[in-house]
Amino acid sequence: MKVPFVDLKIQYQSIKSEIDAAIQNVINQTSFIGGSEVDKFEVEFAKLYGAKHCVSVANGTDSLYIIMKMLGIGEGDEVITVSNSWISSSETITQTGAKPVFVDIDPVYYSMNENLIEKRINSNTRAIIPVHLHGQMCEMDKIMELAKKHNLFVIEDCAQSHFSELNGVRAGLRGHAASFSFYPGKNLGAYGDAGCILTDDEALSTKFRMFARHGALKKHAHVIEGINSRLDGIQAGVLNAKLPHILDWTRRRIENAARYTERLKGLEDIEIPVVRPDSKHSFHLYVIRTEKRDELAAHLKANGVETAVHYPTALPNLEAYSYLGHEKSDFPVASSYQDRILSLPMYPELTNEMIDHVADSIESFFAKS
Ligand SMILES: *Cc1c(COP(=O)(O)O)cnc(C)c1O
C-alpha cells in the first residue's frame, strides 16, 4: 500500500466540477487580476472565519511583511518569533529592517514557549509573532498579556492553523492582525501561491490593502510607495470553490489525527502530539518524535509511506542566521527536536486503512529494532 505525504489530486477529484467551473468563470470574465472571485473570497473568508476585514495578498510571506511594514516596524526595531517555523516567520522581520529575536519552543506543544518571551523583550522590541505551528495554537492568553504590559503588537502567523481554536477563539482573532497562507499544501490551499491578512481594525486593513496595491487605493492615486502583492482571480476562484468544504476537511483531519493517536499511544519509543487543553488542533501536520527518526523514515519509505520533517534545521541554526552568532544551546529544545521530529501523512482524504498501514509499519519497525 502506498501512503503519500499529501494528495492534492484526490481532493481535486472530489470537487472537480466546482473547481473547473470556478476557473472557467474567471477565464470567461477575463478577470485575471481583481474581479468578482477575489471580492467574493475576501467577503466570504472573513465571514466564515469571524473576522471583520480580509485583505487578500499574493502569499503568506508577503502578508507578514505587509503587516509589519504598516505597523511601522523597521530599522532599529526587534521582533520576537519562534525558533521552529518556516523561514517566512523570521525573514520578513529582516525584510522590514528589524532584527529577528528567537525564543525556544515548548517541549510538549512544539510552539513558542510563552514563558521565555519576556526575557527577550527590551526597549527596541515592537512585536511578537506567535506561529501556531502544525495547527496547534500558542498560549495566546499569556502572549496577549505580555504584549499589553510591554505595549507590543501581536501578529499571528496562521499559515498552518486555519480554523484552529483556543478557548473557543479561532487562531488569528486575538492579535492585531493575522497572516494566512493558501499555499497548495496548506489546510486551505489554492492552485498556486495565495495568502491573506485578517484583522478587526478597519484603519489597519485599509493600510494593508493600500501597501499591497502599490500604495494606492484608487488607480494612479499612489499615496505611498508600496509593493505588488495580489491574489489572482483564478486562485480566488479555487479558494471560493473550496471554502464550503473547509470545515468538513478540518473535521476529517482531526478524526484522522485521533485514529493515529489511538493506534500509536501505546508505543514507548515515540512521542505523539499532545493537544493543548480547551483547544482545537487543526492538524496541518501530525508530528511524532523518536530517537530513531531517520531509520524510522527509511523503514516507512520501504513500506510505501512518505514522511517529511518540519523542519530539519531550527531557524537560528540555519546558515542564514549565522550572523546572529547563536549556539545550539541557546535553543536547546528546538535544536534537539530538529533531529527527532517526523511528520506523518496527513490530509482529509486519508482512509482508515492508510492510517492503519502507517501505524502497523511504525509498530513493525520498533518490534524488530
Ligand atoms: C507556509 C508558511 C508561511 C508562508 O506562506 P507562503 O504562502 O508559502 O508564502 C509562513 N509561515 C508559516 C509558518 C508557514 O508554514
Image (cartoon, rainbow, N blue to C red):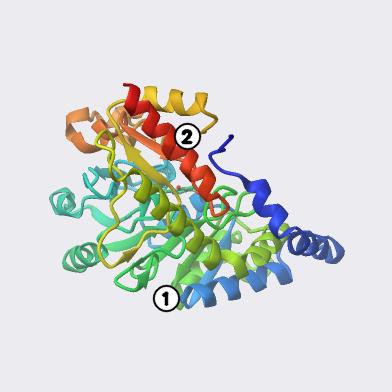
The secondary structure type at the circle numbered 2 is: loop
Q: Which label's residue is closer to the chain start, 2 or 1? A: 1
Residue found at the far right of this picture = 28
Q: Give the CA separation, mark 2 to mark 1.
A: 40 Å
Q: Quadrant of residue 40?
A: bottom right
Residue 264 at x, y = what percent?
34, 43
Q: Is mark 2 within 8 Å of ligand 1?
A: no
Tell me: 202 left or right of 93: right
Residue 201 — which label? 1
Is residue 1 positioned above or below 169 on the image? above
Q: In the depicted view, which residue is nearer to us: 170 or 199? A: 170
Residue 209 in view in this figure: no
Q: Nearer the viewer, residue 258 or 278?
A: 258
Helix, strand or loop status at disc 1: loop
Q: Nearer the viewer, mark 2 or mark 1?
A: 2
**Which residue: 34% across, 74% down?**
168
Point out residue 110 in the picture as x, y percentages from the top left corner: 28, 46
Q: Whole-percent x and y of residue 91?
A: 41, 42
Q: Which residue is mark 2?
A: 307
Crowding around mark 2 (Cα neighbors within 10 Å: few <14, some 14 to 19, many 20+) is: many
Tell me which residue sits at (43%, 27%) in the image: 297
User: Which amino acid type corresponds to the residue marked 2 in the rendered image?
Assistant: Thr
**321 up-or-down from 107: above or below:** above
Question: Which image quadrant: the N terminus?
Answer: top right
- In this view, 69 is above or below 346: below
Type of residue at label 1?
Answer: Asp
